[in-house]
Amino acid sequence: MMEGVNATLLAGWSLAALLFAAALLAPLGGGLRRGAHLASAAMTVAAAVTLYSHDVMALPQICAALIAGSAVGLALGRGVPRSALPSLLGGFGGLAGLGAVFLAGAAWRDPNAFGLLDEMSDRLRMEAAAAIGAALACGAMACAGAAAILRRGAGWRHPVIAAATLPATGGLVAAFAASPDLLRLLGCIAVALLAGWAATTSALRSGTGPALALAGGFAGWAVAASAFFLENMPMVVAGGLAGAAGTLFRARLCGSAGRKGLADAGRRP
């Protein structure tokens, strides 16, 4: 065991990661309900470990927010008709992305409060700036993707736009990491919004499922990047798993009536 790592925290992080992995694997066997229960348990464990590992001053407010959010989610899940579930899921992914954008903006605005300053130069550390830029970009893409799903893809659907804006977003994140100023931050958000909208509307050509998977993947990567500069390992694992799952599901569902998906790549027509 690594020196300095609390055994309770390590056990909690490991349990949360295992539960998240089991939740992702459960739907493959048809256990959608079991997967949802495992994901809920994983989030509960991750939240408990996070609260245990930090000196939380506003614990009553945090608990109240968790209870209120759980009640709203339960009410929506039970009362929303099946036809509206894609819009609901897309909206939830957009809210997660928006939260990551606000959190990353707060970390950039006051890095000292998050412990992100270099002790020698008193400047924002490059790895922290890269994580902030990634959280901003992925969060903005999740928001734009959710908006595209809610509008059912009204707008650009040409894949060339997504192919051009996605690398541009990565380049702006790298530029922001090198020099985290306001102009590059705003440029990163603007191009990421365009990239998220273009990529999601392009995915909508294959159906709502691939678009939801892509938007959810953006939200997962945004959560992972946010948790990285917060040094919250269970959320890094959870966000990374969600991001990877969304990206892979998007690739799995990319087939349409006119072409084969990755699942049929090894089969003959």
Image (tube, rainbow, N blue to C red):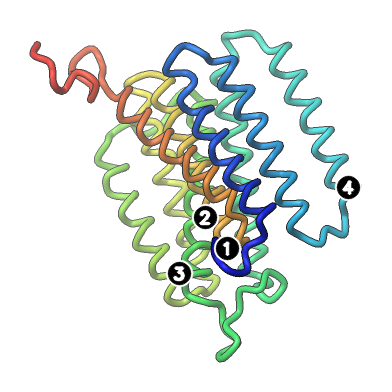
Could you say where residue 82 lies in the image, as x and y percent from the top left?
Answer: 59, 9
The percent coordinates of residue 228 (x first, y second) are 55, 59
Q: Quadrant of the N terminus?
A: bottom right
- 5 left or right, relative to 185: right
Q: Which residue is mark 3?
A: 176
Disc 1 target residue:
229
Question: In the image, what residue type sits under mark 1?
Answer: Phe
Disc 2 marks a residue whose amino acid type is Ala
Q: Secondary structure at mark 4?
A: helix
User: Tag 1's secondary structure?
Assistant: helix
Circle nearer the N terminus (2, 3): 3
Residue ID at (51%, 65%): 185
Residue under label 4: 61
* Marks 4 and 2, how far apart at CA: 25 Å
Residue found at x 67% / y 31%: 41
Q: Nearer the viewer, residue 7 or 254?
A: 7
Please give the label number shown on residue 225.
Answer: 2
Quadrant of the frame with the C terminus: top left
Figure quadrant of residue 85 = top right
Please tell me which of labels 4 and 2 falls first in the chain.
4
Query: Is 27 above or below relative to 229?
Result: above
Q: Amino acid at mark 4?
A: Gln
Drawn side of residue 171 relative to residue 75, left or right? left
Whole-Å distance between the Cαs marked 3 and 1? Answer: 15 Å
Q: Give the spatial CA distance, label 3 vs label 4.
A: 34 Å
